[in-house]
Amino acid sequence: MTQHIALVIDDEPDICKLLEITLNRMSIQTISAQSLNQAKEILRANQVNLCLTDMRLPDGDGLDLVAYLQENYPDVPIAVITAHGNMETAIRALKLGAFDFISKPIDLNNLRDIISVALKINTRPTKYAANILIGGSPLMQILRQKIIKLARSQAPIYISGPSGTGKELVAKIIHQSGPRQDEAFIPVNCGAIPQELMESEFFGHLKGSFTGAHHDKIGFFQAAHKGTLFLDEVADLPLSMQVKLLRAIQEKSIRPIGSTKEMSVDVRILAATHKDLHALVSQNLFRQDLFYRLNVIELSVPTLKERSSDIPLLTQHILTKIAQNNNKEVPKIDSDALNALMTYPFPGNVRELENILERAFTLSDNKKITLLDLQLPSSISPVEQNIKLPLDDYLLNVEKKTIIDALAKSQGNKTKAAKILGISFRTLRYRLKKIGLESDDQSTS
């Protein structure tokens, strides 16, 4: 196996020596430089796998080297060593393309975690995104490219977009396209956790630390150690919890309830919400410092309306999945129904499309989905409404009479009635409820 080579740039001999010893114990060869120009010469002469640089150099700073690497050696991950508590500099480095940052005094466990993840970057496949995201529109092609690039970094990402656009799916793809793909992906709905349980859920607790704590419990950060923590609906966190979350992210450590010891955690943070975090910050409803820490890089997920050309492909994919789940053949969708989907605004985005097609599959004959099966909301004139209502009543009466006849022929046996009608038992139940002939608590025989 070829030995990895790390370039260490620092004008303090003690720091260089500490980094060299740590890297050598990890079977990583090191080359040291004391200046920016010397580092550039080494990069031109050697195939380097990783860079660790101090911020302050005699002829420049670490940010200059980050920019240089991004332009000339984009495949070489670089971590920047910053003064303790200098998060503004760390965030600037991450925005420029640094893989991660290391705070002084250097925590060796944290250093080893960062190096281990960095060396996995170019040994892991990054094609996962292309296989999972459905759609060939320009916006989706751009999104795929961004995901593959961002998957290489450890910078926190704020995934923005309205409800139903697939923000959690995007977060999962970032995780599975990057160097942490073999570790846990822990999604957390911040709006679904009772406020009094939040600290325990995030940081864990020790047995006996409070009434009801009958055993030790690991929190989300510990569960996501070496993996990814996805904070969905992060805007719903109360201000008191925002302070504690900020500290955990900045210090890369947590303290379980009842413990007197800090615990290092190696977690990549991804966050999302359908709310406008910028507006919440201006209203003092979301901490500005936490917002800047989460929003190092913003990734916007397009609405379905913005990529309507993807609807036919999405429709086919969703119908195939629904049919497989029901052990049925994939139904066709007629042109009128597809055209209606193409022009519908989809305020609920992909999630709404899934719900519409699930309902249409249930209402259809399982062979073809029609416009009537979709039951799309529409804005029609009062005159059209007057015409439509009698037609709806007529169709409902026809349906009711047909079902009653089938039940009469089968002597009330719904399974036999469904066979007579050529529909599934599940579809018959749905239609019986729709026309008022059965409630949820009636027999399924």
Image (spheres, helix red, strand yellow):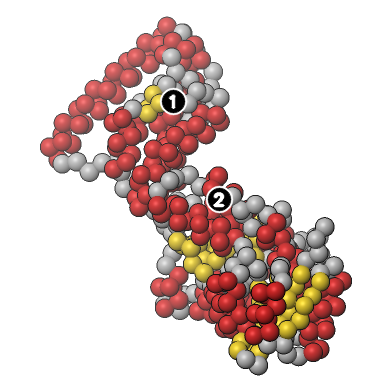
Question: Residue drawn 19% across and 27% down?
Answer: 390
**Left or right: 191 in relation to 48:** left
**Left or right: 437 in relation to 299:** left
In front: 426, or 50?
50
Residue 1 location (% of width, % of height) = 82, 57
Question: Residue drawn 47% across and 37% down?
Answer: 318
Give amino acid for label 1. Answer: Pro
Disc 2 crowd, CA 10 A, few/some/many (<14, 14-19, 20+): many
Q: Quadrant of residue 99?
A: bottom right
Looking at the rendered image, the quarter that the C terminus falls into is: top right
Give amino acid for label 2. Answer: Ala
Question: Residue drawn 42% across and 21% down?
Answer: 367
Residue 129 numbered mark, or none? 2
- Seen in the picture, residue 10 relative to 125 is either above or below; the reply is below
Residue 359 numbered mark, or none? none
Residue 331 numbered mark, or none? 1
Res 330 seen here = yes
Residue 77 location (% of width, % of height) = 65, 69
